[in-house]
Amino acid sequence: ARVDALYGAAALIVLATGLLKMTPFGKPVEYYGQNFIFHIKMTVFLVVVLLAILPSVQFFKARKTAPDGTVTYSKSVGVLLKIEMVFLMIIPLLGVMIARGYGYTG
């Protein structure tokens, strides 16, 4: 459950630093708006967030009931976590592609 909380905090930091790239610190907003790979990356990020909801809820519920802090979870939660990890590996690849100019249609 602690790792899940750290994971959520890391996701917020990644989102915040990514949004900073859409300010004077990075490329103009138009660059990202006209880049279809950026839209794919944001969709994958949203899918990861949605996939993380059920495991997070289960971890926090189980943490409150477990006296020693050990959390067990169902097989379906394990499958969701594995799917999340696959999508998480795709996000940096898409970021590199965006930084190199792939997908820009402007």
Image: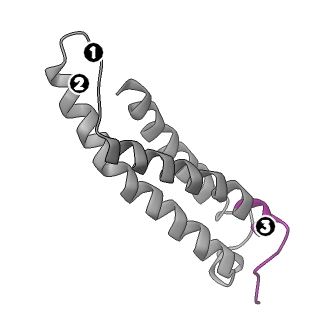
Q: Is residue 86 above or below residue 56?
A: below
Number of callouts: 3
In the image, the segment drawn in magenta is 95-106
Label 2 amino acid?
Arg
- Mark 3 or mark 2: whose residue is earlier in sequence: 2
Q: Estimate the spatial distance between the alpha carbons at disc 3 and disc 1, rounded to whole Å.
A: 41 Å
Q: Residue furthest left?
A: 65
Residue 22 lies in quadrant: bottom right
Residue at coordinates 29% horizontally, 24% vertically from top-left? 71
The label on residue 13 is none
- Mark 1 or mark 2: whose residue is earlier in sequence: 2
Residue at coordinates 58% horizontally, 53% vertically from top-left? 86
Query: How far across and down, in percent of the image, does residue 105 sit?
Result: 76, 89
Q: Residue furthest right?
A: 100
Residue at coordinates 65% horizontally, 52% vertically from top-left? 89
Mark 3 or 2, which is nearer the eye?
A: 2
Task: Look at the image and tell me in which quarter the N terminus lies.
Answer: top left
Membership of 50 in magenta stretch = no
The label on residue 69 is 1
Q: Which residue is mark 2?
A: 63
Membership of 100 in magenta stretch = yes
Q: Which residue is mark 3?
A: 97
Is the Cβ of the residue at disc 3 closer than 8 Å to that at disc 1?
Answer: no
Q: Estimate the spatial distance between the alpha carbons at disc 3 and disc 2, rounded to whole Å.
A: 39 Å
